Each structure stands twice: as structure tokens, then as C-alpha cells.
Amino acid sequence: MTQTPTRTPRTRRPSLAGTLRAVGYAAGLPALALLAWVLATDRSASLYFPSPTTIASTFAATWFGPALTTDVLPSLGRFAIGVLLSIVIGVVAGTAIGTTRWLRDLLEPMLEFFRAVPPVVLVPVLMLMLGVGDSMRIAVIVSGCVWPVLLNTVEGVRGVDTVLTETSRSYRVRGLLSLRSVVLPAASPQIMAGIRLCLSIGLILMVISEMFASSSGLGYRIVYFQRSFMIAQMWSGIVLLGLVGVAVATLYGFAERRVLHWYHGMREVARG
Amino acid sequence: MSRRRPRILAAGAALLALGLAACTADDADPAEAGDPAADGTRAVTIGALSISETAPLWAAVEAGVFAEHGLDVTVQPIQGGAQAMPALINGEVDLTIGQPFGVLRATEQGLTVAIIAGYAESYAEGDDINAVVAGAGTDLTRPADLAGAKVAVNSLGAAGDLTIRAAVEQDGGDPDAIEFVEVGFPDAAAQLEAGNIDAAWVPEPFVSMIVGAGGSSVVYPYQAVIPGLPTLVVQATTQTVEQDPELVASVREGLADAFVWAEDNDDAVRQSLVDNLSLPEEAAANLPLPHFTTTVDQGVIQALADLGVEHGYFQTAPDVDMILVD
């Protein structure tokens, strides 16, 4: 990595055939799987395995009624707050730890310890400390999501090319300016990888945090449906979770392409 | 890299769907319930929660009460009524012991299950075995006070919150003003102490523990609304009931004998609490137990069904005549 980050003004215009092929690839397997599912459950009278058509017909009624405002949106809100907090805490603390040697030596063993503690076992403790409301649920999400961002930021900041840092230092690029224009951009591929992990962990913890001391939320609803033998509704909740996961991954994709535009461009150049 | 991600996700989802589809193929024929063994005894698996109410069953099985009725009973621990239902449907267990409300709910959703016998019921008068208890610092004294309070139940949408709602309404309070929250029984005492909740619906031994620590009993919701409401009943699929009336009859007789035996052998029942639940001996000796009986009062189950309809827990009225088999 001897080049400085540069912006490559390349845009590729996809051909029609290429677009069709991409859509075919993306939708082909899900469509086949759905077909297999329909055929397998078509004549099944089992309550526990309703057909996708039954699930689809309950989907709208279950989630686009009052449940949207009492369960879905609050859940997504807690997820968003939890993930954003994790990113802010992770990047700020990670940069501090990564750039300060003594802090790193002091904290690293402890970080490894706390990272290894599964957030699920912390729920009863957090419930006592923070009550049974939203703050507890957000804390559960943060307690699991912060680690990939934090540790990746530490690694990313520490691994900045020394030629880069020394060159910029000789040009008197220091302090905040150096942080903003040299260190953080150079560490951003690692940070973004951490954020991607953070998103999937956050979704899992969002569901888990609602299985304790709860009376609303996506995770709570799914368990409630399961317990009330409303199996088609339960499956529709699982489908909704999957769709949320796809939507979050797509949003992440957009963000990553913006933030790491230079990085992908550089790699394409390097590959020739 | 980022452009590939949705595809990978989609592939994962598709594989999952395929896997699930494959699962449906082999749940068609439930295993035959308890085939007769060479010596004439039948193996029967009964799913039961690991709670103090199961003590007489454990003790009676160990003492050989069921063997006299030609039954070789295995008690299979289960996690909860709803979790046990798939095991009952696919024949992994022949019978389960669970809440009557769960059976009503399951039949409403199209599962073919029935109540074949009673198991345990709350007390129609005196100290009941579950109560809504308030923490030390609150001034909740009567059911109507619960309107506007944060009340914990172990699982929402069941007999606990239903009877609390009815008790509050009966006392002139607004049931919609109760703020219910799900807290597991063992966590309720700590949550009350921390002030995160105002009151909690708990069974024994938690009632005694919380009241002993300065809390107060607000209401016995079962007793106040449906006196003598069963807490647990014995459930089977209607398939078992129709195809194997012999099994149903002998389990019913065996269980009735077991309860008579348990009354005369309280020490053995208390000992099984120590053995199976690792309770300290002193706690086991003093633990209040419910009334054990195999008879079910149809009027009481009907009252529970009616209450569920009245408070919007059921969309269609459960057919109690069909659910309760003799």
C-alpha cells in the first residue's frame, strides 16, 4: 500500500443482458426454493408447517396492522439506536486505544475477556440495573455489537502503513487533521468489516432482548405466536426478520460503496 | 464484494427453506402410543414440567403405583405447554401435563388435543397457590389498584393475565390500564425489589418468599374469578383418545390411585421434591402444594373459556364438550 487513497472516477454502465442475468441469479434460487416449499406443504395438513401461501396471506394482516407501530417500528428503532451507539463507541474508543500504546497494553486483556461474555447471560443483570424498558434492550444490543467495531478499529488504526504516517508527519499533518484525513480513512476497510458483523449480531440481539421482560416487539411477537399455536403468524414473523436482514445488508452495501469507494477503486487498479 | 452479499443471503434463505420443506415429509405418522410389552405392561411417556406440582407423579412412579395398573410410566421433562405440543402431536410423548388454557388455545388454532383428566387445581377458599404480590414499597392493596400499575406475569396471553384482568374489572378497575410485562417467576422477586415492576403474579414458593421479604399479597386471581380453577390437566391428542381408550382409562385410574397414595405418603412426595428439584429439605417440607385430583369440573373449564371470549383472548368460543373427554 504505497499509494495514497485516491478517488477513481470510474462508472460502469451495465448492459441489459448483464442486468437480466444478475436478476436471474439473485432471484432464481429463492424462487426454486419457494416452489419446492409450496409443493412440499401443499397437501400437508400439519399445523406446524403451513404452506407459503398461507404465510403470505397472514403476513399483511399480522404486520401491517397495529403491530407495525407497537412491535415492528419500536424493534427497528432499538436496533438502529443500538447499532449506531455501538459504531460511535467502537470507533471512538477503538481509535483512542489503537493510537495510544499504553492504553492498548492496559486494556487489551480486559477487552478480550468482555468480548467473550455472551450478551444473553448479561440480560438478567442488565434487567436489574436498567429496568425492563428500552434502555435495557438497547444495552443488550450494544453489549454484543460494540466488539467487532471496537476491535477492528483498534487493528485498523494500529495497522496504518508507517510510510503513510511518517510521510504525513513530515508534512506536519498532526492531531485531528491526521486522524480525519489519514488514520481513519486508512483504517476504514477494517472498520467497515466490523460494522458488517455488528449489523448481523445486532439483529440477533434485538430479537433476544425482546424475549425477556417484554410485552411488545418483533422478537416478543414471534415467541407469543409460537406459544399461542398461531404457527402461520409465527412463520410470517420469521420471514419478516429475514427481509429486515436483507434490507439491512442492502443499506450496508450502499454505505460501504460510498465510504470505501477509493478502496474498491484501488483494488481494481491493483488487479489490473 | 458488497454486490455479492444479497445473493449469498438469498442462497442461505433458499437452503433454509429447502431444509424446512424436507422436514414436513416425515411428520405424517405419529409413533404408536405405548406398545404392549411381553409381560403385559405398557410403556407410557408423560411429559411434565420440572415444577413442584410434578412431585406426586415422580414419587408414585418410583413407588410402583402405576405398575399395579399395568403401566410402565416414564416422566419426560418438558419446557412449557406450547413447547410440548409438537412432541405430543408427533407421538414423542403420549400425554402431557399442562395448563388447561393452553388446550383451549391449541384447539382454537386447529390442533386436535383434549383434556383426559384433571391433575392439580387451585384452592376455592383459603390460601391459594398463586397470587399477585406487590413489592415492599407499594400501596397496592386491592385488585382495582392494579389498574395503572406495572404487573409481571410469566407469559402473556394465558390464564394468569386473563384472570388478573377479570379480577381488576370485578373490583371496579379498568383492566386495559394494567401494564403487563413478561418476567419469569424466579426473576420476579428481584425485579420487585429493584422497583422495575409494581406487582407480580407468581406461584408458590415465590408467594411465600416475596411476602416473607416484606411484600404483600394483593389478590388470588384464580380464586377471585374462577374458584378452584385447575392449574394443570392431563392432555392427549384426540387420536389417542379415539384409538386407545384403554390407555386413557388406565392412566386415569393409575393417576387417581397415585393421588390417594400421595396423600398417605407425604414424606415420599416431599422427598421427591428434594431429589428431582434439588430443593433444600426444609423448603420442601413447608412448600404449599395444590389440590391434586383427576376429576375436572366442566363448569369451571367452561367459565375459563367464556372469560377468554369475553376479554378477546379467543376469536371463536372453544367447544368445551369436545375438549373435555370422559
Image (cartoon, grey):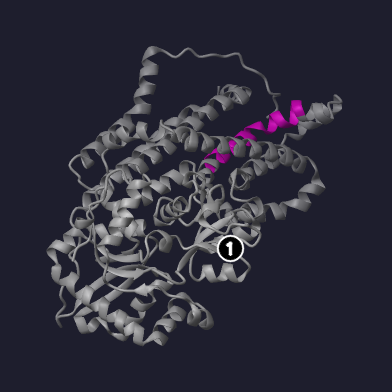
Magenta stretch in the rendered image:
A180-201
Does residue A106 appear left or right of residue A152 in this picture? Answer: right
Q: Residues within 10 Å of mark 1 (few under 14, many from 20)?
A: many
Q: Is residue B128 magenta?
A: no
Image x and y of residue B247, in percent: 17, 71
The disc numbered 1 marks a residue on which chain?
B
Does the image show residue B86?
no
Residue closer to the observer: B316 or B45? B316
Residue closer to the observer: A212 or B30? A212
- B285 is higher (above) or lower (below) than B243: below
Q: Is residue A189 magenta?
A: yes
Counting labels gives 1
Residue closer to the observer: A104 or A236? A236
Residue at horizontal 63%, vertical 44%? A135
Q: Find disc 1 in the rendering and name its residue.
A: B189
Residue at horizontal 68%, vertical 23%? A5
Q: Mark 1 is on which residue type?
A: Ala
Residue closer to the observer: A79 or B317? B317
Does residue B279 appear left or right of residue A59 in this picture? Answer: right
Image x and y of residue B9, in percent: 43, 35
Residue at horizontal 72%, vertical 35%? A160
**Prevailing secondary structure class for the magenta stretch in the rendered image:** helix
Image x and y of residue B21, in percent: 27, 44
- A189 is higher (above) or lower (below) than B124: above
Does residue B310 appear left or right of residue B285 in this picture? Answer: left
Quarter of the figure with residue A157: top right
- B8 is higher (above) or lower (below) than B35: above
Q: Secondary structure at mark 1?
A: helix
Quarter of the figure with residue A152: top right
Does the image show residue B44?
yes
